[in-house]
Image (cartoon, rainbow, N blue to C red):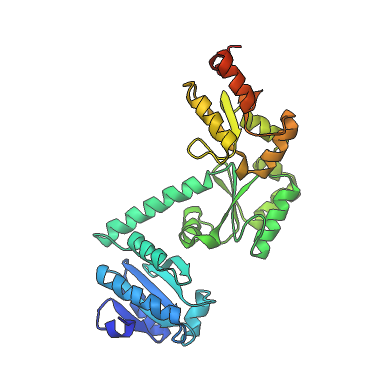
Amino acid sequence: MRFTEQRKMANLVEATTQRQFEDFLAKAGKCLTVVHFQAAWAPQCAQMNEVMSELAKEHAHTTFVKLEAEAVPEVSEKYEIISVPTFIFFKAGEKVDRIDGAHAPELTKKVLRLAVAGGPVAAAESSAADLNQRLKKLINAAPCMLFMKGSSQEPRCGFSRQIVALLKEHGIQFSSFDILSDEEVRQGLKIYSNWPTFPQLYANGELVGGLDIVKELAESGELENTCPKAVTLEQRLKAIINRSPVVLFMKGDKEAAKCGFSRQTLEILNGTGVDYDTFDILQDEEVRQGLKTYSNWPTYPQLYVKGDLIGGLDILKELKESGDLVSVLKGES
C-alpha cells in the first residue's frame, strides 16, 4: 500500500514547505516525530514509505512525515541530508536520532524504542534517565575517552584529526567513540556535559574539554598529568597476564574456541574445577605477536599461572597425566 494512499491517517502526513515541517514538529510536542527525507525518483524511498505506513498504524501517537528532500533544501541542508532515504527522529522539536539508508528493521527498532509509551512527560523523563546512564558508562569505558567524528585511525573532521595527533604526540593512552555512528549519543552528550561541540575529551570520567583546552594543556605541560600516559607493550602484557591467577591466551573464548588446540585446552581446564580467565588473541594482533617474544613461546594457546608461563596444550596434557595439573593451577608447585 503506497504512502500517498494513507495520507488520510492523522499521524501520516506530508510536508512540502519548511513552515509545514516546523508546524508538524510543534504539534507533536514531546511525542516522537519521524521525518522521511525522500525523493520521488528513488524506488527505495517508495519501499520505506510502505514501511512507514504500517508503522503509523501501530504507533498512533507518533507522527510520520514525508518530505521531498530536494524540494525543501533549507530543511535538508540544516540536517545534513546527503542521500535518500534518510530518517530523522525528533522529540520536543529536537533531533534525537538518525538513520541513513533503507533499513526497515532498524527503522522499526528505533521507532519502538523512541515512541512515547504512556504519558509523554513520564516517558521523556525515563528516556532521559536511560540515556544519561548510557552516557556515563561510555564516558567511563576507559580512563581517557575521546568522543569524536570518526575513529582514531580515521578521523572525519579537522578538529578530531588535530586532537588525535596531539594525544598521540604526547603519548596519551585513550579510547574513542564515533559520534557519527550514534545520533542519540551525539546530541545527548552536549546536554550531559554542557559542552556544545565535538571533539570532547574525558579523563577518569570528568570532562577535560575540546581541542582548544587540550592544546592549552599540551602547551603548558599539564596534558600528561591530566590524562593517563600510554603504556608500553611489555607493561600491557604484564597487566593482562596478571589480571587473574590463571590466564589462558587462546583463539576464541570460553564459550567458543576457534581452533582445535584451544578447544582441547578448555576441556582440560574445565575438568579441573579451577577458575580461570581467557584472552582472545584473534581480537588483538599486537598482543598476539608481542606475547610470542615476551614469553619466548611461539604458539598458542599459552597458559599463565600467577604471572608465570606454564606452557601450551602438550604441557597441560603431561601435567594432567602426571596428576600435577590442579596443584600447578593453584600455584602450589
Residue 216 in percent (x, y) is at 70, 52
Q: In which quarter of the image is the C terminus?
A: top right
Residue 288 seen in the figure: yes
Q: Which residue lies furthest to the top in this view?
A: 333
Task: Tell me what residue is drawn at x 75 percent, y 49 percent.
Answer: 169
Front-most of residues 222 and 200: 200
Compared to 94, does 294 lie above or below?
above
Residue 130 in percent (x, y) is at 38, 51
Q: In this view, does 314 lie to the left or right of 206?
A: right
The number of callouts visible is: 0
Residue 151 in percent (x, y) is at 62, 57
Compared to 151, does 255 lie above or below?
above
Quarter-of-image position of residue 277? top right
Front-most of residues 143 and 150: 150
Residue 25 in percent (x, y) is at 36, 74
Compared to 240, does 321 lie above or below?
above
Residue 324 seen in the figure: no
Task: Tell me what residue is drawn at x 47 percent, y 47 percent.
Answer: 136
Front-most of residues 298 and 96: 298
Compared to 143, does 294 lie above or below?
above
Q: Is residue 42 left or right of residue 264?
A: left
Front-most of residues 222 and 325: 325
Task: Tell me what residue is drawn at x 67 percent, y 52 percent.
Answer: 214
Q: In this view, does 43 lie to the left or right of 257?
A: left
Q: In which quarter of the image is the N terminus?
A: bottom left
